[in-house]
Every structure is written in structure tokens, then in C-alpha cells.
Amino acid sequence: MRGSKVKKLSSLFGSAINKASKKSSVRSGADDTTLKQIVFALDSSAANTSSSENVDKTSKRLLKVSHKAACRSNKSVSSTSSQLALETLSAESQSINSVALKKKLTGEISSLLCGSTVPHPPSSSALSFVGSTVPESSNSSALSAPDDGESMEKVLDIPWLSNISHASVSEHRKEISRHKKQKWVFKNSQTHRFGRLVKMCAQKLGTEATLEVFGRLGRETGVKEYKALMEHCIQQARDSEDEEVSLHEIHKAFQLFRTMREQGFQIEEDIFASFFMYLIDMEMVEEFQFFNKIIQDENPGSVSRLGYYEMLLWIRVGDEGKVQELCNYIGLDNEGDRYSLAENYLLALCENDRLKEVMQLSEVMDITKVSSLHCAASIFKSLGRLLLENLAEKFILAFKTCEAGVENMSELIYYYATSMPNLAVEDAILKFKVLHEKLEVAPSSTSYEKLIVYCCDSLKVHAALDLVDQMFQLGLTLSFESLNSILRASEESCDLELVHPIYLLMRRHNLKPNGDTFRMMINLCVKMGDFQGAYKMLTDLEDWNLVPTSSMYNAIMAGYFRKKNIIGGLMVLKQMEYAGVKPDTKTFSFLIGNCECEEDIKKYYEEMQNAGVQVTKHIYMALINAYVNCGQYDKAKQVVFEQGIPVKNINEIKSALISALASSGQIADALKIYEEIKQDGCIVEPKAVLNLIDHIQTEGELSRLLELLGELNDLVMWFDGCVKVVLYCIRYKHLSSAVDLLKQLKDKDELATDSVLDQAFCQISEMESTDMEMGLDLLLAVKVELGLLPSRTSLDFLLSSCVNAKDPRSARLIYDEYQKAGFPYNILTFLRMYQVLLASGEHTSTKNMLKKIPQDDPHVRHVIMACKKVYGNSKSVKKK
């Protein structure tokens, strides 16, 4: 496949390079309207907002024509998808009201870029009390779609790339920055929305049409847009199994490169990095060299970084001659620019643990001239993985003679010690200390804090606390970020009781925490049930000149509600009032979610509105849970149709509705909503899927459960779902399906399979059936089909099942399995076998087994007496 890709792609590149770039002529105003109609048609939800049937039909027709035009683009490189789509759409757009479409365009772009809301018809029942108590005004806009047409039009006027002269670039950038700060709050979510917009446009129209769409919207295309489109093309090429499709996508990425060059953009590493990594992964040597030459010509300053990717390429394709050639080239002269190239070669070699070449370059390079800590850290990580301690010591000693590298020596030792393979956390800490003493390097606060985070990542909280003590003994300072890492690790490792020694350590060394530190400590106390300790920390806030926050009180309130202590939760609300702390969204979500009647729901919702608290997804979820708890299922369903729900949250809120309905036994309604989400092409939250699996436990639902299990992509979630489905299969005797799932589980995590098998055999022991066939068949499948030995726990459960079934024959088979699996018999094994024989009425065998049981322990004698009392009069039972 690689050879064919080289020929076909090279020919495409050649034809593209030979073509003269053609500038697009200025189109008429009708074409501008057409492009806006295309953008409006991108989102399927636009059909719900249309106020004209004619516009609905036309939009659908535009999408259909655009799709056909895009398909035809595969037949001819010279006639792109965007050109065909635009030419066809030009004839279709004459009858469309441009004014109406402009308004709809504004709404759709606002939805994607600004996080505006999905317009829905007003609810008639879910939040009917809102309309009766709160007048429609600016204060109650939380549940209504905002009118941001005017602001959106102003925002669209802001250029993404300026055409002004270079002399006034700096001043103009400052002006635009001030203007953006007044209009927008740029967050990660906005970057995500922009990526969604680019992806949607690229999928519907193609890359060239997408660029033209942005231009018609009044924003010129900049580096950010090109980068997003290029990454989309590369991802499409990676995902496709069709060679022709991959070649076509890569060719489109090349066209974007060419367009950027024509427009005068400098192609930096953040643009070409993902493209080069694709070529390297696909082992496309000729294509790599082709692009390498282009970028070197356009950006000579990138030659050193290009050397990094070139070395990765030859390592990937296994061309040892080329790898050695590059190393020899550096060996001749490593001064000036060539040293920077040598550094990038060494970085690529270290990342791939090329021991021979790393040793070769280390002999001719001055490690103290490495330009960045990132590069030096990669080198020391590789030395740790390769166990090159002598070389690491040599480099550290070299840094000691150089002022620039002295401050980083302790960090480099950390990178070496923590990268050594198969080393326990305690051993890595010991190696860290030994190297500091041996090389006479003073440890730094930064390296110790990295070591603390390393311990926390491995949930070794006690080791992290020991390091904190050592830091204070050495006179080093500890940041509150490191303290917060220890608290988070304590929660994850369930070492909740460590909050008290951490708090004492904080007071003893007069550490200055922040509000988040106290919130986590209060949360740990609450999870332990130590509400008194949590309140004590609230009163101690004054010692650090900190004020209590709503999040601290929310942690206590959540603890009471988890314990179903409604009075305690409401008491926290009163204490917030006394302390002058205003409740926030989380506070009201807890209060509403734990309401036991509709009157309380209405009461707290009105209080929230009066307090001016914003309605978030947590409030909508709380309303759903509250209505379900009150048995008002129809009102719970109506919540998802309320105006004001952001587009990005609608699926999460619908998933919460699925979970709530499933938990309350409304499985049919939950499945109906699940199907609606799937039909819309959206993804149901994994927690909702797990909740469905957990509550669909009636016979005849195996196919449905397997379908739901297939929806879980996260390994942890899939494991939880797999356990539930396996137990379902055992309960209803679907042995083959259970074994198939166990095979999948073994492929993903063999160690976890033993735990699931123990649960399966436990379920068999608890079943009312006295037939041992299921248990013995599963035991055989474990040995033959899975190739595993049963655990002692599984055999113990099977032997217990024989007691209920009064089946001595099966018991003897299982008894022999202990020895086959390498487990010596113990007192519990003898006692279970004694129970089986006694219950089956085999008195002779019972007496023989009784002689094997040591009776020194009074508990053992008590069990024997109880067995005689229960089964002493049993008659012999014969089984086939």
C-alpha cells in the first residue's frame, strides 16, 4: 500500500504544483447570500427554528445538492467540491428570502461560537410555576433564548486577520484585543465550538468552500483556521481504510499548505508537525522529502526542527544507514546551527531509546549547550529507561561546571530516577536521594514537588507526606499546589483519614493554603462522616485570613444529603445565611434535587430566581431528579424542552433523564429517550448507559444489554458494564454469551477476569436452582475456552453451591480441582466438603472427612455442631 500511495500522491502533488494559482473573482451579492444559506443548512437543528416552510424545504435541498457536488469532486481534481457546490447552489438560491436567512445565520453561528441556546417551544408543565411567579424580564432570562442578534452582527464584523499595513500592526492588535475583551470571554469551550464549526463545514462543503464561507462571513482566514482544517484532513486520512480517500485528504492538506504560502503566511512547526507525523507513521518517504524541501525553502529557520522529524522518519522505516549517516554528519562539525540540528537528532534518538546512537552523539556533543530544559529532560528520561547511570552522572558533572545548568541539575536527576523501568515508587525515591548525595547536588523545591506529584500519581500518599517532612528539614518551601495534589490523591486512594495529619502538618509549618485546599479538606472530613471536623476547619479559616465560600458549605450539604439527612442539609443553608455566604448554583441543585414534593421544588426555584443565580445544567438535572422522586414523570420529561438549555449540554441533560427514569423503574420511557438521542446521531453519556444496563434485568433482554455494552468506549465504564451483563447471563443461563464476554474481558484485562469470575460463581451459589450443571459448565469453559485456572474463591463458591444442591458427586469433582489448580486444602475446604457429605446423607464419607478437620479452634467446633444440627438427619441422595 505504501508504494502505491507514493506514486499516486506524488503525481497529485506534481500536478498541483505545476498549476498556477488562480484568484477568485468578486462574486455578486446573491452568491454571498448563497454561502450564508449553506452555513445555515449545516446544523440539522436549523429545521426546528425555521419560521417558513419554504425556507425549510430549500435548506434541505441545498444540503442535498451540496452533498452530491462534494461526491463528484472525487472524479476530478481540477473541479473541487466547493466549486461544484457553489455553482449549483447559485441557481437554487434565487427564491430565498435573504433577510430572513441572515437572521437565522446569525442564530446558528451564535449557537456554535457563542454557546447560545437551542430554541424550543415553551413548556406547558415542567416549569410552569416559573411563568406564574417570575415576570418575563431581563432578570428571568435564564430560561429563555437570549436576543443576541445585534451583538452577533457586531462580532462578525471583527476581522480575524487584518489587512492593515505592517507599520500599524501593533497598535491595531491592541485595539482588537481591547474590543474582544469587551465583547467576549474566551474560554476553552469557545475553541471547542470553533473546531466543531470547522469540522462541520469541512465535512459538508470541503476545505476550499469552508475557507470561502469564512471569507463571506466577513472574517479573513488566518493561521488558526488553516491549522484546524489541516488537522481535520489529516484525521480523516488516518481514520479512513480506503487508500483513495486517504490520498485525497492528504492532497487537500497539501493544497492548504500551498494556499498559506500564496497568502504570505510562514509555515511554523505547529502547522506542519501533525502532517509530518502522519507521513512518518505511514512511512511515506518521498512525500516527506517533498514537503521537507518546501518548508526549508519557505522557512530556513526551521531546518533544525525538521531534522528532528527526519530522524524519526528513518528510525520508523528502519533505514539504519540513513540514521548513521545523520549521526556521522553531526560528528564532523557540531558548532553553530549544526549544534541545534544535533540537539534535535539526539532528542529523536532518545525518544526511541536508540542506545548506540545516543552514546555516539554524547561523545561529540557538549550537553551544557542544550537549548531547553525540555530537551535535557527527554535526554535524561531516555538515559533512565536505558539504565545509563554512568552517562547520566557524566552529564550532571558537566552541568556543575556550567552556571546556566546548575539550577536544573536536581530536576534532571528526578527525570532519570523516575524513568528507570520496573522500579517501585519507594526505590525511585531512594535512587533520587542517592544520586544527589553521590554527585553532591543540592535538591531543589521544584524537584521535590515533582517527586511528590509522582508519588500522588501512583497513590502513594504516605510516601508523599514523608517527602514533605524531608523538604522542611532541608529548608525548602512547599507550594499549595503540591499540598492539593496530596489531598486529591488521599481521596482517590480512599485514605480519607490522612486529612487530619495533613492539616496538622499545614498548621505546624505555617503553610499558606488557598480556598480550594480547605474545600478539599472539608470534603474529606465529610466523606469520613466527621462533620464536626469539617465545621472546625470552617471556623479556623480566620487564622489564615480566608473567608468561607459556598463551595465549602456545599461539600457539607452534599454529605448530609448523601446520608439522606434532609434536616442536616437544610441546616447548612441556615448556617450559610448566618455567615453571609450566598448560595450558588450547586447549592440550589442540591436543594432542588433532594425535594420530596412539588411545593418545595417551586419554593427553591423561586428563591434561586430571586437571588439572581444562573440556571446551569446542574439545575436542570436537579429538576429532573426532583420530579422523578415525586413521581411526576411527565414534568421531568418536559424539562429537556425548556428554553435556555445550551446546545452543548442538551445530551448530558437528556442522559440524566434516562438515568433518573431507569432508576425509578420507568425502563420503557428511558429506552425511548435513549433511542431518540441515538437517532439524532448524538452520544448518550456512559453513566446513563450503565444505569440502563443495571436496571434492565428482566429475562429476554440480552440483545438489548449487549447493544448497550457496545456503546461504552471507556475501558473502566466497559468493565463495569461487562460485569453486569455477565451476571445477567449467569442468572438466565446464557452460558455461551457469558463466555464470549469473558473472552473479550480477558483480551482487555486478564487480571480483572478473575474478579469477574469470582462474582459469577458467587451468583451461581446464590441461585435457588439445585442444578449444578451451570456451575460445572462454566468451570469447564474457564479451563478450556479461556485457558485460565479457577481461583480458590471461585472453587469455594462452587463447593458451597453443592451444599444447597446436596450433590456429593459434583462436590468431589470440584474438590479435586483444588489440587489441579495448585491450591492446598484448608479448614474451610474441609468444612464445606463435610457439609456437602452430611447434607447428602453419606455418613461414612462424612466421618472420614470429619477426621481431617482440626478441631482446636472453638469456632470450628461450633460450625461442626451447627452442621450436625441442620443436616444430621439427612438421608442419602443419589444423583445422576
Image (cartoon, grey):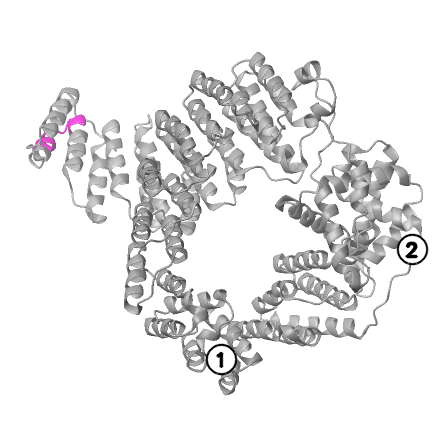
Q: Position of residue 168 (x, y in %)?
A: 79, 60
Give the left or right position of residue 51, taking residue 870 as reference: right
Measured from the top left, where is residue 241 in percent x and y?
Answer: 62, 59
What amino acid does circle 2 point to?
Arg
Tag 2's secondary structure? loop
Residue name at image x 60 percent, y 40 percent: 683
Quadrant for the N terminus, please: bottom right
Q: Which residue is mark 1?
A: 320
Indicate the position of residue 309 as horizontal and vertical percent values: 57, 71
Please indicate whether residue 400 sits to the left or right of residue 215 in the image: left
Q: Residue furthest bottom?
A: 332
- Above or below — where is 660 with respect to 190? above
Question: For the residues marked 1 and 2, what is the alpha-carbon distance in whole angstroms?
Answer: 55 Å
Q: Is residue 743 above or below residue 622?
A: below
- Is residue 442 at least partly visible in the picture? yes
| Label 1 neighbour load within 10 Å: few <14, some 14-19, many 20+ | few
| Element under disc 1 | helix
In the rendered image, which residue does mark 2 sit on? 27
User: Which span of residues is magenta-colored?
Assistant: 838-847
Looking at the image, which residue is at 16% across and 42% down? 825
Magenta region's main secondary structure?
Answer: helix
